[in-house]
Image (cartoon, grey):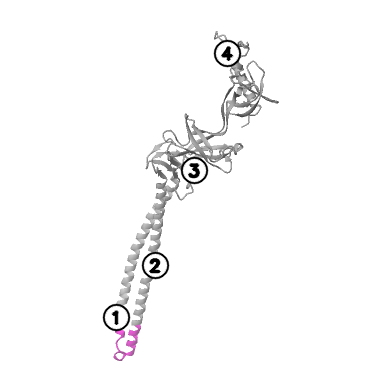
């Protein structure tokens, strides 16, 4: 990355301003303390034997060595595999969180980790139970009424059958044995008995079919109420979620709010609320600013340092870079590419999802070059100059820089050359 001409000057200006504030603070305290730091009372520190001020001598000396130019990204640890805990499939599309286990809590399989609000199901459950009781009562009453009514109709049918049998036997007497009027009357009585029997039989059949239909409808209504009870009960039971495995809980983020999910938040069916990561294999999710597009490529090796354990360095490889830049936060103007980094090894003892990581990718390596501290360089409109102690600045050319030093080239450079302050 090329160093702009105004950055060292701005840094020096800020240093001077801080120094001035410190001196003024010490002058205020002068009556309370007999000793004051040199240079804070408005006087100039005594020069060294070679006429160089201490500030210039503090810039160091020119050396040869190796300089590595790196690109730094920020990221966080994440597990390659995890057991997700999602909102179950319930009749309602959204449901609110009533209770949620703490982020980072260590749990065992079967432990309660999440409870979703079931108030929208308790009222339908009570209504369904009331409906079931009412329909069962109606069903039993209908069955009892049907039994009584059918028994009465069966008795009437049996009576009509007996009457028809009697009238039919009397009508079977030969016409020659009875007066014609009596014989015709018996024929008429037998026909009436037959019609009465058929009517009683038809009434019994239709009444039985109607009763069975009414009973069947009530049985369907009872079963429907029971299905509603089972659905509401299952939904209520499903809203109490247990851990599927042993591990550490990680609460998902609400991107719109820029925080972790918490009690009272609304979640929808299928949304991941918690997860239990597999700490045996970790990776890093990093951000590459859109202005740095092309600085790193898939397959590039990187060094990763946990902010919580800066003495531990883990090697890794850039596995994937998203094809487009996305907002880093919900409705944020800052855009970046998502970068996935696979680690060569994981450390389950110290690594936890969400831990911040510093990722360094090597861009250029300059070997056996002159190395000058940044503070010894002076950037002017006509070029870059190396400040020396007691001598004129030397015009140099920059090859590359890191956070503290620059690789330079120029005439008159030598090993051990004492350097001054650039500004």
Looking at this view, name the residue that lies furthest to the top: 34
Task: Please report whichever mark, 1 or 4, sits nearer to the chain's N-terminal start.
Answer: 4
Side of 19 where 222 appears, left or right: left
- Circle 1 Cα neighbour tier, 10 Å, few/some/many (<14 / 14–19 / ≥20): some
Which quarter shows the C terminus? Answer: top right
Q: Name the residue under label 1.
A: 166
Contact between marks 3 and 1 (CB within 8 A): the answer is: no
Task: Please report whichever mark, 2 or 1, sits nearer to the chain's N-terminal start.
Answer: 1
Against 219, residue 352 (above or below) is above
Q: Name the residue under label 3.
A: 266
**Main SS category, magenta section:** helix
Q: How much space separates mark 4 and mark 2, taking CA atoms?
A: 106 Å
- Circle 4 Cα neighbour tier, 10 Å, few/some/many (<14 / 14–19 / ≥20): some
Helix, strand or loop at label 3? It is strand
Q: How much space separates mark 4 and mark 3, taking CA atoms?
A: 57 Å
Helix, strand or loop at label 4? It is helix
Residue 60 is situated, as x and y percent measured from the top left of the image, at 58, 19
Task: Please report whichever mark, 3 or 1, sits nearer to the chain's N-terminal start.
Answer: 1
Residue beneath the point at 32% across and 87% down = 183
Residue beneath the point at 29% across and 77% down = 162
Task: Please report whichever mark, 2 or 3, sits nearer to the chain's N-terminal start.
Answer: 2
Camera-nearest label, 2 or 1: 2
Residue beneath the point at 35% across and 79% down = 194
Q: Nearer the viewer, residue 133 or 406?
A: 406
Give the residues in magenta.
166-188
Q: Mark 4 points at which residue?
A: 26
Decide if residue 255 is in sight here.
Answer: no
Question: In the rendered image, which quarter is residue 218 located in?
Answer: bottom left
> On residue 210, which mark appears?
2
Residue 303 is situated, as x and y percent measured from the top left of the image, at 51, 33
Helix, strand or loop at label 1? It is helix
Against 42, residue 368 (above or below) is below
């Amino acid at each position: 990355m090329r160093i702009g001409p105004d950055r060292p000057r701005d840094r020096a200006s800020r240093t001077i301003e801080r120094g001035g504030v410190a001196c003024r603070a010490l002058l205020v305290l002068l009556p309370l303390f007999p000793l004051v730091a040199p240079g804070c009372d408005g006087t100039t520190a005594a020069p060294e034997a070679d006429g160089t001020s201490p500030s210039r001598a503090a810039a160091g000396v020119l050396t040869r060595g190796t300089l590595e130019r790196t690109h730094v990204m920020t990221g966080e640890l994440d597990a390659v595999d995890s057991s997700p805990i999602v909102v179950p499939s319930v009749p309602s599309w959204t449901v609110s969180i009533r209770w949620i286990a703490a982020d980072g809590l260590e749990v065992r399989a079967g432990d309660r980790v999440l409870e979703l609000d079931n108030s929208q199901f308790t009222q339908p459950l009570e209504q369904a139970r009331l409906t079931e009781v009412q329909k069962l009562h109606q069903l039993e009453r209908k069955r009892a009424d049907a039994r009584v009514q059918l028994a009465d109709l069966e008795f009437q049918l049996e009576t009509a059958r007996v009457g028809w049998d009697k009238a039919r036997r009397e009508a079977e007497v030969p016409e020659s044995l009875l007066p014609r009027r009596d014989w015709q009357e018996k024929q008429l009585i037998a026909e009436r008995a037959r019609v009465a029997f058929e009517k009683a039989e038809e009434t019994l059949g239709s009444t039985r079919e109607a009763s069975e239909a009414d009973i069947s409808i009530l049985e369907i209504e009872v079963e429907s109420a029971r299905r509603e009870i089972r659905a509401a009960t299952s939904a209520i039971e499903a809203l109490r979620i247990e851990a599927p495995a042993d591990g550490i809980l990680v609460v998902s983020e609400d991107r719109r709010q820029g925080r972790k999910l918490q009690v009272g938040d609304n979640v929808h069916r299928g949304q991941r609320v918690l997860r239990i990561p597999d700490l045996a294999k970790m990776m890093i999710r990093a951000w590459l600013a859109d202005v740095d597009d092309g600085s790193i490529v898939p397959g590039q090796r990187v060094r990763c340092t946990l902010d919580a354990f800066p003495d531990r360095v883990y090697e890794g490889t850039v596995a994937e870079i998203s094809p487009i830049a996305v907002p880093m936060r919900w409705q944020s103007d800052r855009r970046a590419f998502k970068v996935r980094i696979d680690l060569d090894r994981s450390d389950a003892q110290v690594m936890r999802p969400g831990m911040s990581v510093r990722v360094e990718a090597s861009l250029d390596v300059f070997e056996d070059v002159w190395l000058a501290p940044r503070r010894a360089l002076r950037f002017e409109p006509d070029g870059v100059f190396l400040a020396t102690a007691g001598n004129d600045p030397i015009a140099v050319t920059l090859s590359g820089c890191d956070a503290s030093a620059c690789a330079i080239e120029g005439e008159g450079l030598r090993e051990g050359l004492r350097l001054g302050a650039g500004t």
